[in-house]
Amino acid sequence: MSTKRSAPDFILVFLTLSLLAIGLVMVYSASAVWATYKFDDSFFFAKRQMLFAGLGVIAMFVIMNIDYWTWRTWAKVILIVCFVLLVLVLIPGVGLVRNGSQSWIGVGAFSIQPSEFMKFAMIAFLAKYLSENQKKITSFKQGLMPSLSLVFLAFGIIMMQPDLGTGTVMVGTCVVMIFVSGARVSHFMWLGLLGAGGFVALVLSAPYRIKRITSFLNPWEDPLGSGFQIIQSLYAIGPGGLLGLGLGQSRQKFFYLPEPQTDFIFAILAEELGFIGGSLVLLLFALLLWRGVRIALGAPDLYGSFLAIGIISMIAIQVTINIGVVTGLMPVTGITLPFLSYGGSSLTLMLAGVGVLLNVSRYARY
């Protein structure tokens, strides 16, 4: 391994903190009305988001100084712990149910979402596996099958909660990592067909998923039911125009768009800050992804490269799905927008992931 650089990628730090700052402002703006009505405190969600943001930033700077090979050493242990947590969350009385999903474990006044931790655990372990078995990855039985079996085992447990959105992000991230490691395109074509069949089966197995698909294709078919969120999201984005209605001036946050501080926060941002504000956020994400890919290409070893690709792919997939849902291009999945949406586990883990990426940047050769 090459000598450690004197400093991490400061452009990546700036981009991350910029998105985080925008997120904190928008969480308050989007949630103030709902928080006042429900908790008699307009800052209820904003204060909690600031707490998690603070913890996440501390974690980011601490992890930035931890040799990324540490995650290679502890990858198996972290993965096992996350599998245990995924099983525990399914136990009645241990797992907490929110919006129809038993995905959280209560820790005092707060809660954690084990599936969020599993995303990072799978990235760390898969990076280790691929770096040690890259020559075997072209073999379906010896390379591709063992890695995918583990991924789909985790996906199966996550689907028992059920949490299709988080599971989709995890699988998508792992597929990108395996693809760039040199797996055969023909194998992915067959797996793609198999995956499409499995996705159809998952959709048909649950009536609410079928409604999400049909509402995505034509939300006005059921405007007060399955199509409600998409319609209200479009009603937020449309009036925003070029410059927006002004910060804090959203109309859809007045109980039209349910819990706008979470999955649909970009709709409120577009309504208040307009096309220019939304484009600025997307530009910041694009620059962040560019820095991440640059770090992955410059990493001194395969493990660092796969680790960086995994983290940046996870961010890219979440951004793509979230923006797709908010703009009506994809079915509603419950995926948060990285660094902007309200959510403790997601925000903290995302910032910790950036910390790992920053450590890789300290060794990268640009």
Image (tube, rainbow, N blue to C red):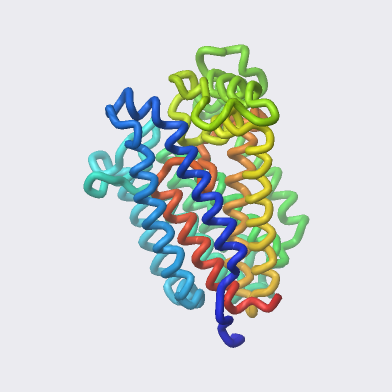
Answer with left or right where residue 186 lies relative to residue 146.
right
Give the percent coordinates (x, y) of residue 362.
57, 76
- Position of residue 125 relative to residue 73, above or below, is above
Q: Tell me the quarter of the image containing the N terminus.
A: bottom right
Which quadrant of the view contains residue 300? bottom right
Taking the spot 43% from the left edge, 47% from the top edge, the residue there is 157
- Position of residue 11 relative to residue 19, above or below, is below
Q: Is residue 167 visible?
A: no
The front one of 319 and 275 is 275
Q: Is residue 105 visible?
A: yes
Give the percent coordinates (x, y) of residue 233.
57, 25
Residue projecting furthest to the right: 186
Which quadrant of the view contains residue 12? bottom right
The front one of 43 and 203 is 43
Q: How many marks?
A: 0
- Position of residue 127 relative to residue 173, above or below, is below
Taking the spot 48% from the left edge, 78% from the top edge, the residue there is 67
Give the percent coordinates (x, y) of residue 339.
51, 48
Taking the spot 62% from the left edge, 23% from the top edge, the residue there is 234
Which quadrant of the view contains residue 325? top right
